[in-house]
Amino acid sequence: MADQELARDLGFLEAYTLGLGTMIGAGIFVLPGIVAESAGPASMIAFAIGGVVALLAALSLSELATGMPKAGGSYYYVNHALGSFFGTIIGFGMWAGLMFATAFYMLGFGQYLLNQPSSAPLVILAGLIMATLLVALNYRGVKETGSLQNVIVIFLVGLILTFIAVGVLAVNFGLLDPFAPQGWPAVGATAGTVFVTFIGFEVIATSAEEIKDPGRNLPLSMIAAVVTPTILYILVMFVSTGTLEISALAGSDVPVADVAAEAAGLFGALSLAGYTLEFAAVGSGIMIVGAILATISSANASILSAARVNFAMGRDQILTNWLNQIHERYQTPYRAIIATGVVILALIASPLPIDTLADVASFMFLITYALVHVAVVVLRRADPEAYEPDFRIPSVLYPTVPILGFLTCIAIMLQMGEVDAVFSVGTTEISLAPISWVQLIGVGIILASIAWYQFYAKEQAISTTLIGEAVAPQETETPENDVYRVVVPVANPATGGALIRYAAASAAGRDRTGEVVAVNVIEVPPQTSPSQIEFEEERVENQRTLLENARDVAEDLDIAVRTRAIVGRNAGDTLLSVVDEEDADHMLLGWGGERRRRDVLFGSTIDPILERAPCELTLVKDPSETPGRIVTLAGSGPNAPVSTRRAGELRRAFPDSTLTLLNVQPKPGADDAETDPTEVGQEAISAVASAAGLDADEYEPRVIVSDDVRGTLLDAVSEYETVCVGATGSSTVAQALYGSIPQTIVEQSTGTVLMARGENRTPRTFRRALIQRLSSQEEESS
C-alpha cells in the first residue's frame, strides 16, 4: 500500500492565521502588570528581545520542517536529528511547558473574570472549572471550535489595534522615565517571562505536512506570525507604561482593562435618554471580555498541542501507546487529553505564583529551541542524503542564525527567575542561590526526563540516526506531462473494483500513456492530529484494504495504477488538491444517486469537486462489473460528446458490451413538413460521435421520433444496463442537474448511470492570480 500522507490544504494565509491565532492570546492581557513591575517601561525591550529569539527559532524551524515534514514539530526534529535521549528531554519539556502555560492562562482567566488576585480561592476555582470544561471539550472533539477560534482571533486583533490607537492619545512620556528602573539584567530576565507569549508559532511547524508549497509558505508564515504580534506587544507595553504609573500597573489584577479605562476616560461620558455612558467603563469592560476570550482560546490551543506531543512521543515509543488510544465515538486521543488535563488542574491548584507558571513554560520552550538550533547545525554538517529542505537558512545567515539563536536561549534561561530557591528544614534555611525557583523546576523536569529515558525509553524507543528512515520520505515524483491521468477516489469496498475498471477504461482509451491514481481519504476532526490516525486501527485497516483491492484489480488491467492514502480535514478539499498535484485529466467518482437538500445537492464531499475541479469529471451510480448494453444520449447538450466518449471507452474496454447512441426527435409540425426528423437525428448522432472520437463501427445509431420527447427518452434508456448522460446547461454540474432529465434518469434507472461533464477551467480569482504572479517572479529571480 502507498505510504500514508496528509492533505496539503493550508496556503500562506491559512498557515499565517493559524500561527497568529496562537500568538495573539492571553499573555498580552495578563503579563503587562507582571513585567512592568520587573522591568518598568523597558519591558517593551523585553518583548522585542523575545521576538528576536522567536524569529531566530522560526528560521531554524522552517528549515527543519521543510526537510522533515512530519507532524510533531520541534520534538520530532530533535528526536530524529539528535537521538531519543534529547528527544525525551524535548518531549517532556514541551508537554510540561504547554501544561504550565495552560495553568497560567486559566489563572489569568480567573483574574479578569473576578478582578481578584491570582492567589484568591475564587480565582483558582474559576480556573479549575474552565480548565475542566476545555478538557471535556477537547475530549469530545467539537469541530466547530476551529471556526470559533478564528472569530476570536479576528476580534482580539481588532481589539488590540483599537486599544493602541486610543491609548496612544493618553500616553504621558514622563511616566517612561526611568526607562529601566531595575537595571538591564532585570530586562533580560523579563524577556524570559514574556517568551510564553511566543510559543504559538510552533503550531505552524507541526502542520508542515499540511502546508502547500512549504519551501515558500512555511518560512513566510512563521516569520509573519512572529513579527506581527511582536510589534503589537511592544505598542501595548508602550501604551500601558505610558498611561499608568508602574506601581498602579503592577498592583492591578486587570492591568490592560485599567489602562483602557484611563485612556477611554479622556473622552468623558455620553448621555442618552437619561442614561450616562462612561467611556472609561466601556473601555474597561470590552478589554475584560477580550481577556476572557483570549485566555480561553490560548488554553484550548495549548491543551490540544500538549495531547499531540503525547502522540508523537508514543509513536516513537518514548511513551507508552496506551496514552494514544483514539476514542471510538469522538475520534480524539482521549487518554492523552485526560492525562494532560489532570496535570493542568494540579498546577492551577498548586501554590506556584502565576508569574512562576509563565516563567517555567518559557524556560521549557527556550530549552526546546536551543536544541532546535543545534539540530540544524548537526544536519547541515552530517548532510544526510534524504535531508533536502525546500527552505534553507540563507548562506549569509548560516551558521550565524543557529549559533546566535542557541546562545540567546541559554543566556535568557540563565537570567530567569527573581526569587532564589530557598528551603526550610526545621529551623535551618537552605539557599540554592543563585539558582531561582524557575530554574530549579526547569532543571527538575529535565532530570525527570533523563531518568525516564534511562529506565524506560532507552530500551523501548525507536533507534534513529541522521540518515535513517525517520527523515521524511522522498516526495512523489512529478507526474510526466504526456500521461493521461485519471483520479478515482475509492471509499466503498462494494464498488471500488468496478470504479477502478471504469477509470482504467478511460485511461486506456487514449493515444498517450494512461495512468489511474486510486485515492482514499480519512477525515479527522481538529482535535486529532492527522498523523494520529495510525492509532485508529479499524479505519486504517479499511483504508489499506481498499487500496490493496485497487492494486489487485489493476493486475488484470493493462494500465498503470498508483495508490495514495491521505489523512485530511476535509475530503472534498483534499481531493481537489490531489487533482491539482497530479495534473489530472479526469476524475471519476462513485455516487449513491440520492437527491440532497438544495444547498448540498450531491453530498458535502462531491459538491466542492463539482464546482471547482478543472478536469473532466464523471459521477457513477451503481457501477457494475460489466456494463452490458450501453446507451448514451447523443443530443445537442454541451457535454454530450464527453458522455459519449465515456461510453466509447467502456465499449472498448469491455468487448462483450454494445453501444447505442440514442437521439429522440419531436414529430414535425405543419410548418416543418419538409423536415425529416430521422435524418436530423442521424446527423446529430454523427456529429456527437465524431466529436467523441468514435468510429462508425463502434456504435449503433438509434433515432426515435415522438410527440413526447422526454417520456420517450426515459422509456428508451430503461431498456439498457448502462446509461451515459452529459450534464446539461452552462453552469456548474450541481446546479445544472437539479431537477433535469439526467437527474430523472438517475432516479428511475435500476442499472448503472454515468453522468459526465467536460473541463471546467474557471477564471482565476484575483487572490489566486496574485499569488501565482508573485510565485513566478520569485522563480525568475532565483
Image (cartoon, helix red, strand yellow):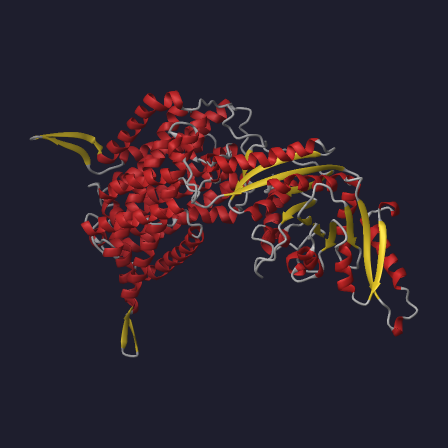
Residue at left 42%, top 33%? 312
Camera-nearest residue between 726 and 315: 726
Instruction: Please identify the quarter of the rendering in which residue 675 is found.
Output: bottom right
User: In the image, residue 412 lies at what x, y percent?
Assistant: 31, 35
User: In the image, residue 490 lies at what x, y percent?
Assistant: 61, 41
Q: Is residue 591 visible?
A: yes
Q: Is residue 62 visible?
A: no
Check the image and name the residue furthest to the bottom.
273
User: In the image, residue 752 lies at what x, y percent?
Assistant: 70, 49
Check the image and name the residue furthest to the left.
427
Camera-nearest residue between 328 and 514: 328
Look at the picture and state if 258 lies above or below 566. Answer: below
Camera-nearest residue between 494 and 145: 494
Residue at left 63%, top 54%? 611
User: In the image, residue 189 lies at what x, y percent?
Assistant: 27, 39
Look at the picture and state if 451 lies above or below 645. Answer: above
The reply, left or right, for residue 64 in relation to residue 49 is right
The reply, left or right, for residue 688 in relation to residue 741 is right
Residue at left 37%, top 48%? 137
- Image quadrant holding the C terminus, namely top right
- Image quadrant holding the N terminus, namely top right
Camera-nearest residue between 330 and 162: 330
